[in-house]
C-alpha cells in the first residue's frame, strides 16, 4: 500500500467511526417516532374510537407537510449546515411526539401527525446529502445500508419495549399508549441538543482530521464531482432539477417501494396480532424477528453491490425476494409460515435500500444532490399520503391480506419501472471502475 492509499484508508476509517454510529442512532430515534403509532394503535384505537379507515388517514396526513417541506428543508440544510439544521429537526419532532400523550380525541392525534411530518421533513434526504460530503462513491452503498440499518434496528429495539409499555405502564391513570409517545419522544430532544455540538458540517471544518487527511478527502470528492460533470451530469439549477426525467423516474420507483414500506410500517403490529392472536408484549417480540434478519442481510447485500459496481439488478433481485415473502404471509397455512414470510420480506425490502440510494448519486452532485434526493424522497411522501387511505380501506374491507397484496402490487410496479430504466454505461459502471482504479 502506497502512502496516498494509506492516508485514504486512515481517513475513511476515522470518518466511519466518527459519523456512522452517531447518525445511525439519530435515524433509529427518527424511525421509532415515525412508526410508534403502529404499536400505539393496538390500544389507542379502541380508547379513542378510531376505525381502520380513520387510522389510515392518520398515516396519510403525516405526509402532506412532509411532501411540501422536504425540498425547502434540504435547501436550508445546504445553506446553514447539517449541524444546526439536523439539530433543529430532531428537537422539534421530539417535542411534537411527546405532545401526543395529551391527546383527548382523534383530531388531536391527527394534528400531532400533521406537525410531526412538518418538523421531521428533510431529515432523511438531509443525511443522504450529508454523506455525499464525506464518502466517495465506491463507499456509498455500504454507508447508506449501514445508516438504514436503523429501520430494522428501530423495530428490533422499540418493538418489545413498546409492547411492554402498552401492557405494563399506566402511571397517573394514563393509558400505556400515551406513555409510549412520551418516552419515545424525549430521546429525540436530547440527541438534537447533542447534535448541535457533535456533528461536523464538512471535511474542511473537521478538527478531528489532519491536514493531509482533509486534503485527500476533498481532492477525492472534487475529482468525482468533476467526473460527473464531464460525463454528462451537471450541477443543475433549482428549476432544472424538476425537468430532469431521471430524477422523476427514480422518484416514482421510490414512491411505490415506499408505499409498500409505509404500509408494512403502519400495519405490521396489527398484521401479526391478527394471525398470531397473542398479547401486545408478545407481538413486540415477534416483530423483532424479521428486523433481526433484515439487519444481517442489509450490509452484506450492499457490500456485494459496492464490490461489483452494479446497482439496478441488486435492487430488483432484493425486491423480488420481498414480494415472495409478502405472498407467503398472505397464503401461509399457519402463523409460523406467515412469520417466516415477514422475515423473507424484511430481508428483501431492506437489502434493496443501500443499492437503490446510490443510483441518484451516480449523476447528482453538490447542491443538485441536495435538491435531487429531497425531490425523490418527496415522492415517498406523496405515496405515503395515498397509502394511508388505500390501506385503511383495504384493511377494513379485506383484513390484513388486503394490505399485504397491495404491498406486492407496489413491489411489482416498481420493479417493472426500474427494469426498463436505462442507465448510461458510464453511470452504471462508474463505481466499479473507481474501485479498480483504487486497488
Image (cartoon, rainbow, N blue to C red):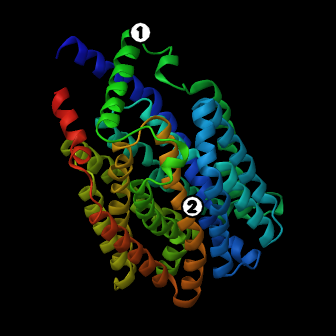
Where does the image place residue 197, in percent across and percent down from the top left?
63, 24
Query: From the viewer's perspective, is residue 16 above or below residue 104?
Result: above
* Quarter occupied by the C terminus: top left
Instruction: Tell me where residue 71 appears, x and y as whole percent.
Output: 59, 48
Give the SS element for disc 2. helix
Above or below, comparing residue 380 to residue 237 in the picture: below
| Residue 14 seen in render | yes
Percent position (x, y) of residue 119? 69, 49
In this view, 91 is above or below 117 = above
Pointer 2: residues within 10 angstroms few (<14), some, or many (20+)?
many
Residue neighbourhood size for the residue with mark 1, other residues' Cα within 10 Å, grouped as few (<14), some (14–19), many (≥20): few
- Residue at which label 2 appears: 381
Residue drawn 38% across and 76% down?
Answer: 408
> Who is closer to the viewer here, 244 or 9?
244
Report whether 99 appears left or right of 208.
right
Q: Where does residue 158 sit, x and y in percent of width and height?
A: 55, 54
Q: Residue at x 80, y 65 (%)?
A: 108
The furthest residue to the top: 211
Specify the quadrant that holds the N terminus: top left
Toward the bottom, the furthest residue is: 397
Mark 1 residue element: helix
Residue 100, quarter of picture: bottom right
Residue at the image position 28 percent from the left and 38 percent from the top: 231
Left or right: 237 with respect to 315?
right
In space, the residues marked 2 and 1 are separated at their CA atoms by 41 Å
Q: Which residue is mark 1?
A: 211
| Residue at point 35%, 53% (across, down) | 356
Q: Which badge, 2 or 1, comes first in the chain's sequence?
A: 1
Residues 354 and 249: in front is: 249
Amino acid at each position: 500500500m502506497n502512502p496516498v492509499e494509506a492516508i485514504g484508508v486512515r481517513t475513511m476509517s476515522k470518518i466511519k467511526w466518527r459519523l456512522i454510529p452517531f447518525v445511525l442512532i439519530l435515524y433509529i430515534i427518527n424511525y421509532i417516532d415515525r412508526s410508534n403509532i403502529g404499536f400505539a394503535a393496538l390500544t389507542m384505537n379502541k380508547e379513542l374510537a378510531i376505525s381502520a379507515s380513520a387510522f389510515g388517514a392518520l398515516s396519510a396526513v403525516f405526509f402532506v407537510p412532509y411532501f411540501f417541506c422536504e425540498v425547502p428543508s434540504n435547501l436550508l440544510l445546504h445553506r446553514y449546515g447539517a449541524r444546526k439544521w439536523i439539530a433543529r429537526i430532531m428537537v422539534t419532532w421530539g417535542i411534537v411526539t411527546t405532545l401526543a400523550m395529551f391527546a383527548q380525541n382523534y383530531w388531536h392525534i391527527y394534528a400531532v401527525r400533521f406537525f410531526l411530518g412538518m418538523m421531521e421533513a428533510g431529515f432523511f434526504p438531509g443525511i443522504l446529502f450529508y454523506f455525499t460530503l464525506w464518502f466517495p462513491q465506491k463507499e456509498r452503498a455500504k454507508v447508506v445500508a449501514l445508516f438504514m440499518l436503523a429501520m430494522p434496528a428501530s423495530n428490533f429495539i422499540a418493538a418489545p419495549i413498546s409492547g411492554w409499555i402498552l401492557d405494563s405502564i399506566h402511571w397517573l391513570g394514563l393509558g400505556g399508549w400515551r406513555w409510549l409517545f412520551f418516552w419515545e419522544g424525549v430521546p429525540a430532544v436530547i440527541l438534537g441538543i447533542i447534535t448541535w455540538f457533535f456533528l461536523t458540517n464538512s471535511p474542511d471544518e473537521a478538527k478531528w482530521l489532519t491536514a493531509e487527511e482533509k486534503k485527500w478527502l476533498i481532492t477525492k470528492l472534487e475529482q468525482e464531482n468533476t467526473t460527473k460533470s464531464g460525463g454528462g451530469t451537471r450541477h443543475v439549477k433549482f428549476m432544472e432539477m424538476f425537468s430532469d426525467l431521471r430524477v422523476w423516474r427514480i422518484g416514482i420507483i421510490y414512491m411505490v417501494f415506499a408505499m409498500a414500506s409505509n404500509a408494512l410500517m403502519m400495519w405490521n403490529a396489527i398484521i401479526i396480532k391478527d394471525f398470531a392472536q397473542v398479547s401486545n408484549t408478545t407481538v413486540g417480540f415477534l416483530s423483532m424477528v424479521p428486523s433481526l434478519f433484515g439487519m444481517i442481510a442489509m450490509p452484506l447485500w450492499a457490500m456485494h453491490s459496492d464490490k461489483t459496481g452494479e446497482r439496478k439488478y441488486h435492487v430488483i433481485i432484493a425486491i423480488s425476494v420481498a414480494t415472495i415473502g409478502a405472498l407467503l404471509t398472505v397464503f401461509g397455512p399457519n402463523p409460523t409460515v406467515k412469520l417466516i414470510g415477514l422475515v423473507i420480506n424484511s430481508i428483501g425490502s431492506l437489502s434493496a435500500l443501500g443499492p437503490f440510494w446510490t443510483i441518484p448519486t451516480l449523476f447528482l452532485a453538490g447542491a443538485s444532490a441536495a435538491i435531487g434526493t429531497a425531490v425523490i424522497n418527496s415522492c415517498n411522501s406523496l405515496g405515503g399520503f395515498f397509502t394511508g387511505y388505500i390501506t385503511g380501506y383495504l384493511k377494513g374491507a379485506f383484513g390484513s391480506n388486503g394490505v399485504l397484496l397491495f404491498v406486492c402490487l407496489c413491489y411489482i410496479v416498481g420493479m417493472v419501472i426500474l427494469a426498463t430504466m436505462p442507465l448510461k454505461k458510464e453511470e452504471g459502471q462508474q463505481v466499479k471502475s473507481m474501485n479498480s482504479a483504487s486497488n
